[in-house]
Amino acid sequence: MINESRLYKILIGPLISEKSTILTEKNNTIIIKVLRNATKYEIKTAIKKIFNISINSIKTLLIKGKKKRHGNKISRSSTWKKAYITLEKGKNLNFMGNIE
C-alpha cells in the first residue's frame, strides 16, 4: 500500500504545450510532470485516487538537464520526469476547471 501523502506529491503538474494539446485532442493523452523516482504503478494509483478516472496506459521518460554557461561557470538544470497518460475513450481530465 502506498502512503496517501506520497500519492498527492507524485503529480507535480500538467505540461501545457502545443504538442500536449494536439495529443489531447487526437489520442486522448495527457502529459504530466511527476516526481523523478515515481513508478508507473504509483502514478496510476495517484491519478485514480485524485481524479477518479480510468487509465489505458502510462509511458514515462526522463528529461536530462541541460548544461548552461554563465561566464566561466557551467551549471546544469535538474533532470525531471514526465508521464504520457492515455485515458479511456470518452473520458477527459480538466485541470483548469471552469475558467471564463
Image (tube, rainbow, N blue to C red):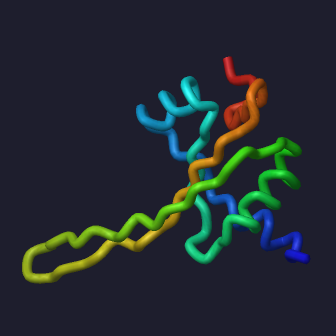
Specify the farthest residue to the left. Answer: 72
Specify the farthest residue to the top. Answer: 100
Residue 17, quarter of picture:
top left
Question: Considering the image in quadrants, where does the C terminus appear?
Answer: top right
Instruction: Residue 85 in the image: state x and y as whole percent.
Output: 64, 47
Instruction: Residue 33 in the image: state x and y as whole percent.
Output: 56, 56
Q: Is residue 2 above or below residue 45?
A: below
Instruction: Residue 34 in the image: state x and y as whole percent.
Output: 60, 62
Q: Is residue 84 above or below residue 9?
A: above
Residue drawn 79% across and 73% down? 6
Question: Considering the image in quadrants, where does the N terminus appear?
Answer: bottom right
| Numbered marks: total | 0
Q: Is residue 38 left or right of residue 92?
A: left
Q: Is residue 95 above or below residue 6?
A: above
Residue drawn 68% across and 59% down? 11
Residue drawn 68% across and 33% down? 96
Q: Is residue 54 left or right of residue 39?
A: right
Q: Nearer the viewer, residue 57 or 92?
A: 57
Instruction: Residue 12 in the image: state x and y as whole percent.
Output: 63, 59
